[in-house]
Image (tube, rainbow, N blue to C red):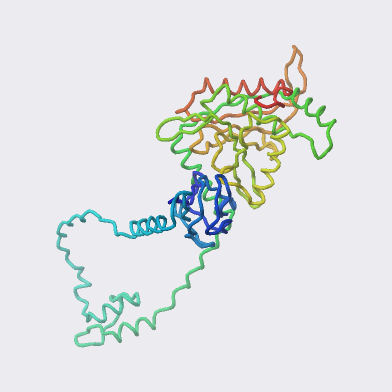
Amino acid sequence: MIEFRLPSLGADMDEGTLLEWRVAPGDAVKRGQIVCVVDTAKAAIDVECWQEGIVHALLIEPGTKIPVGTLMAALRAPDESAEAVDRALALLKAKEAAPRTLPPAPVPAAPHPVTAAPLLARLRASPAAKRRAEELHIDLASVAGSGPDGAITILDVEAAARAAPPGPAPAPAPAVTRAEEMRRVIAAAMTRSKREIPHYYLAEDIALAEATAWLAKENAQRPVTNRLLLAPLLLKAVAGALRKYPELNGYFRDGAFQASAAIHIGVAISLRAGGLVTPALHDVDRKDIDTVNRELLDLTQRARAGSLRLAELTDATVTVTSLGDRGVAAVFGVIYPPQVAIVGFGRVTDRPWVAGGKVRALPVICASLAADHRASDGHRGGLFLAAVRDLLQTPEDLTKESA
């Protein structure tokens, strides 16, 4: 039996809500095929299945919220019988339903004798009156007893309850919006990052005279619908530098850094309703500039429409964030675990710049790096930023595949 369980769609995800199934029992499923749509705090995600088989049973109804790791469906391998899957499912359900054996609880030490307070010692009330007082939240010390020798009766307790002023009605719990839920999820992930990852920070001002001049010349020859943005050039420069300094591209897991052979750049995209997502552009170093430009526009549109795929939210090996369109000169990001680096770009501004012994006004951008000291150090991080700077001085070289 092939188990299809709810995958984690990010380090900050604990649960998700199944919105719909895209398959039915009896359907053949291919590797990479979208089988369901799951709603998280960030977006509705198309979830792929990475094993081939035949859908035997769908175990979760649409609209159900489930934790990560929940068994959602059972698939039958091509050479497996339906009876074998039924038996495996029955064994799995019996195992999950079996009570867990807990170690015996420690025997508590005998409590020290407690002497009742003098006031409570003087109170006389029947057991029934005491129980009624607890139910009505009445302090017996405030009740006058009408029984023999001043004993408190049930009638005394109920009379005291009727005389007590009504307490304020509890305020209804405020509704949590999607933006607030996303902010909570992001805050949890970033808190974990700052607590567990030893960040170091570097920054480099980069002149963009060559890059902007090349873009202007290139776009003058293109129709408006096919013009290039600056962002793809920046992403290609980052990808090229990562090929030289792979210790910034990968994951820190199980106490060790694991370099990634692929360069999948997570792009921080702000959402109209608030919050952000960081879906990945795959194999940026192996694609030409037009492909990166087109895929970036498509990814941004789908992210804001809430239509992303599982691989786009889980495959990023490094993240690039830019707040230049928000008018800030520089941004220093927080690493998104288990990644080990995040690159930031501020806005492009004309600044005095010494070139060829002369002071000129050139377009300049601030590139920053936040990196994990367990995977790299400031020396290698500085060389990485220098490589990004140098690659942007020859923008025509970034337009090809494997830049």
- Of 386 and 291, nearer the camera is 291
Locate residue 270 relative to residue 376 in the image: left or right: right
Residue drawn where x is 54% and y is 62% of the image: 62
User: What is the tally of numbered marks visible in this picture?
Assistant: 0
**Residue, far top:** 357
Give how far across and how far down residue 288 sits, in percent: 70, 30
Residue 16 in percent (x, y) is at: 51, 54
Seen at 46% across and 41% down, the residue is 192
Above or below, comparing residue 120 to residue 307 in the picture: below
Residue 105 higher or lower than 366, as above or below: below
The one of 97 and 392 positioned closer to us in this rendering: 97
Q: Position of residue 23 (x, y in %)?
A: 57, 56
**Quarter of the rendering occupied by the C terminus:** top right
- Return the residue nearer the eye: 121 or 322: 322
Q: Residue at coordinates 84% horizontally, 36% vertically from top-left? A: 223
Residue 255: x %, y % from top left: 40, 33
Is residue 349 shown left or right of residue 130? Answer: right
